[in-house]
Image: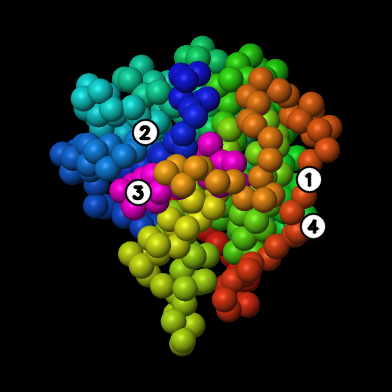
């Protein structure tokens, strides 16, 4: 697992939603055979991890109970793991994570960063598995009202640091921790663009950063037609690939995407070109350095950005969690 967290090449996490209501592909892979076949396809397309989720976190989504979530994900994880495919579980429930880890999952991808279920730290610590701590302020039903920041990058960085400190205090090993800025979760489109533009500031926390912009609504608004109608999810792949390559060039450890092949191809080009870094990206990831130590290292800050977008309207409005 340490090898995965410290991978020298960008990690590609393929999205597999086994839900009826996820924003992009809800219902397409609710059947076990369809879900497993898609997971195998994502792996063959170049995914290092298949991220299996059984509860939608799109804006306004209602929660399902733990039994329903477990029933959706457990058979899929079991089948994929038996086929030798590395799986992560997208859940904020310790109970679900524990069951799925026992079935062969490698990573816990927790959109709540451990806030939704205090027992998650124990499960992760005991399993010794990597834990993705995403920036989160509340469940889908009410997260729009929580998208208030003075400086979104500084505040996300600070709140992620606190989640990392809590994980370390609970006994989770530093080299098992990955952080995620949580694009769209209690964030407007402007917040998402600022986090993208200043991603090196989050990389400088010293922990691997997972970046997930795939097909999200703020990309749809950026690519709106002349009448202002957002681009449908199926037409956001090129923009997703662009955000993923830029994130990796800024120092991201990995990207979470629906269309694995296009992203894997683009990253192959990036590597063949010498893995160039953006001018604002600096310093290697240091998974054993604490957030407090990293914060005293003289972080260079890129200019605050609310877009760099074509229409000014694309940098406004609330972007949902879109999962």
Name the side, left or right, on which 303 lies relative to 200: right
The numbered mark, 2 or 3, whose residue comes first in the sequence reads 2
The numbered mark, 4 or 2, whose residue comes first in the sequence reads 2
Task: Give neighbour class at mark 3: few <14, some 14-19, many 20+ (Cα, 10 Å).
Answer: some
Q: Nearer the viewer, mark 4 or mark 3?
A: 3
Front residue of 72 and 163: 163
- Cα distance between the residues tagged 1 and 4: 19 Å
State the count of labels.
4
Q: Secondary structure at mark 1?
A: loop
In this figure, which residue is indicated by the disc labeled 2?
48
Of all residues, the one furthest to the left in this rendering is 33
Find out whether the residues at labels 1 and 4 contact each other: C-beta distance under 8 Å. no
Find the magenta span and give its range: 248-270
Front residue of 141 and 311: 311
Front residue of 22 and 38: 38
Task: Give neighbour class at mark 1: few <14, some 14-19, many 20+ (Cα, 10 Å).
Answer: few
Occupied quadrant, residue 318? bottom right
- Cα distance between the residues tagged 4 and 2: 36 Å
**Picture disc at residue 150:** 4
Q: Nearer the viewer, mark 4 or mark 2?
A: 2
Find out whether the residues at labels 2 and 3 contact each other: C-beta distance under 8 Å. no
Residue 56 position, x and y percent, is 41, 48
**Picture disc at residue 265:** 3
């Amino acid at each position: 697992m340490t090898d995965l967290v410290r991978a020298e090449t960008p990690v590609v996490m393929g999205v597999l939603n086994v839900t009826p209501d996820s924003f992009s592909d809800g219902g397409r892979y609710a059947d076990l055979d369809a879900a497993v076949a898609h997971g195998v396809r994502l792996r063959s397309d170049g995914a290092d991890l298949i991220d299996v989720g059984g509860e939608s976190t799109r804006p306004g989504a209602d929660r399902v109970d733990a039994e329903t979530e477990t029933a959706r994900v457990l058979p899929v994880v079991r089948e994929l793991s038996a086929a030798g495919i590395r799986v992560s579980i997208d859940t904020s429930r310790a109970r679900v994570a524990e069951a799925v880890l026992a079935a062969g999952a490698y990573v816990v991808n927790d959109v709540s960063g451990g806030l939704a279920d205090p027992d998650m730290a124990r499960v992760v610590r005991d399993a010794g598995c990597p834990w993705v701590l995403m920036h989160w302020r509340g469940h889908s039903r009410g997260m729009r009202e929580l998208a208030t920041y003075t400086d979104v990058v500084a505040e996300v960085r600070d709140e992620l640091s606190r989640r990392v400190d809590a994980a370390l205090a609970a006994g989770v090993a530093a080299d098992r921790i990955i952080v995620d800025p949580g694009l769209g979760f209690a964030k407007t489109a402007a917040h998402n663009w600022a986090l993208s533009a200043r991603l090196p500031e989050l990389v400088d926390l010293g922990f691997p950063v997972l970046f997930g912009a795939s097909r999200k609504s703020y990309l749809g608004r950026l690519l709106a037609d002349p009448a202002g109608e957002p681009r449908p999810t199926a037409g956001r792949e090129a923009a997703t690939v662009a955000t993923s390559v830029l994130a990796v060039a800024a120092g991201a450890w990995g990207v979470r995407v629906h269309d694995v092949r296009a992203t894997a191809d683009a990253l192959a080009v990036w590597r063949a070109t010498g893995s160039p870094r953006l001018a604002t990206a600096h310093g290697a990831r240091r998974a054993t350095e604490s957030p407090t130590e990293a914060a005293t290292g003289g972080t260079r800050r890129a200019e605050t950005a609310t877009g760099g977008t074509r229409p000014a309207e694309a940098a406004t409005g609330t972007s949902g969690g879109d999962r």
